[in-house]
């Protein structure tokens, strides 16, 4: 029954095929879907705690849900799945309130975690979004460049290479 805690439930738009899995005393928040609808990523937070984990599940079987980024020194938020469901990018900020970086996770069998977007401890990187073919990320950053002001839109490869500012130096986003 529903009295034994929280549940993660998925339902199709026509209200058919309701599927639920128990979460116990945890809250699932900040959902994101792969473009093909095959995967869902979300944050799982204990009701009585602060530590948040990033989980990914195949939508065909919610029992496949696995923690991808467990409890760590960073507070994860804003998860984004690539259109093909292979990559997960998460904005992570240290618990001490330092600047945020983007982490890319390859969701293939290796589940490799890469510091992404030329991790920069002096800048906040956030609001990631994938290109249609999942080859690059667009994101907002307050990194300082010669002749620029605050927030700018950048793109980069998933490994942080080929960093390119899209907004003009004198324009904030």
Image (cartoon, helix red, strand yellow):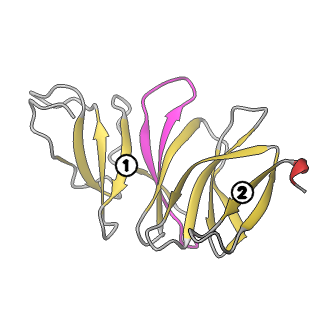
Residue 82 location, quadrant: bottom left
- For the N terminus, the quadrant is bottom right
Secondary structure at badge 1 equals strand
Residue 114 in percent (x, y) is at 45, 54
Left or right of residue 67, residue 140 in this image: left
Mark 1, Cα crowd under 10 Å, few <14 / some 14-19 / many 20+, is many
Q: In this figure, which residue is indicated by the disc labeled 1?
A: 128
Q: Residue at x 67, y 43 (%)?
A: 71
Mark 2, Cα crowd under 10 Å, few <14 / some 14-19 / many 20+, is some
Left or right of residue 17, residue 6 in this image: right
Residue 163 in percent (x, y) is at 22, 50
Q: Residue at x 9, y 38 (%)?
A: 168
Residue 35 location, quadrant: bottom left
Secondary structure at badge 2 equals strand
Q: In this figure, which residue is indicated by the disc labeled 2?
A: 8
| Gap in angstroms between the C-alphas marked 2 and 1 | 25 Å
| Front-most of residues 9 and 105 | 9
Q: Residue at x 9, y 29 (%)?
A: 170
Q: Residue at x 48, y 69 (%)?
A: 85
Which numbered circle lies on residue 100? Answer: none
- When the figure is inspected, residue 53 is found, relative to residue 143, above or below; the finding is below
- For the C terminus, the quadrant is top left
Q: Does residue 151 belong to the magenta stretch?
A: no
Left or right of residue 8, residue 108 in this image: left
Q: Does residue 93 belong to the magenta stretch?
A: yes
Range covered by the magenta-colored residues: 90-110
């Amino acid at each position: 029954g529903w009295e034994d805690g929280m549940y993660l439930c998925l339902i199709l738009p026509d209200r058919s095929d309701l599927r639920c899995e128990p979460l116990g005393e945890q809250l699932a928040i900040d959902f994101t879907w792969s473009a093909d609808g095959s995967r869902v990523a979300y944050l799982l937070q204990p009701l009585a705690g602060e530590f948040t984990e990033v989980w990914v599940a195949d939508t065909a079987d919610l029992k496949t849900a696995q923690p991808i980024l467990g409890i760590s020194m960073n507070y994860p938020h804003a998860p984004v799945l690539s259109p093909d469901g292979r990559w997960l990018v998460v904005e992570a900020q240290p618990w001490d309130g330092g600047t945020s970086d983007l982490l890319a996770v390859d969701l293939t069998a290796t589940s490799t975690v890469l510091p992404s977007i030329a991790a920069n401890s002096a800048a906040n990187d956030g609001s990631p979004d994938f290109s249609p073919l999942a080859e690059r990320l667009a994101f907002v950053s307050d990194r300082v460049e010669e002749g620029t002001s605050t927030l700018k839109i950048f793109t980069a490869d998933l490994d942080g290479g080929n960093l390119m500012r899209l907004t003009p130096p004198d324009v904030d986003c």
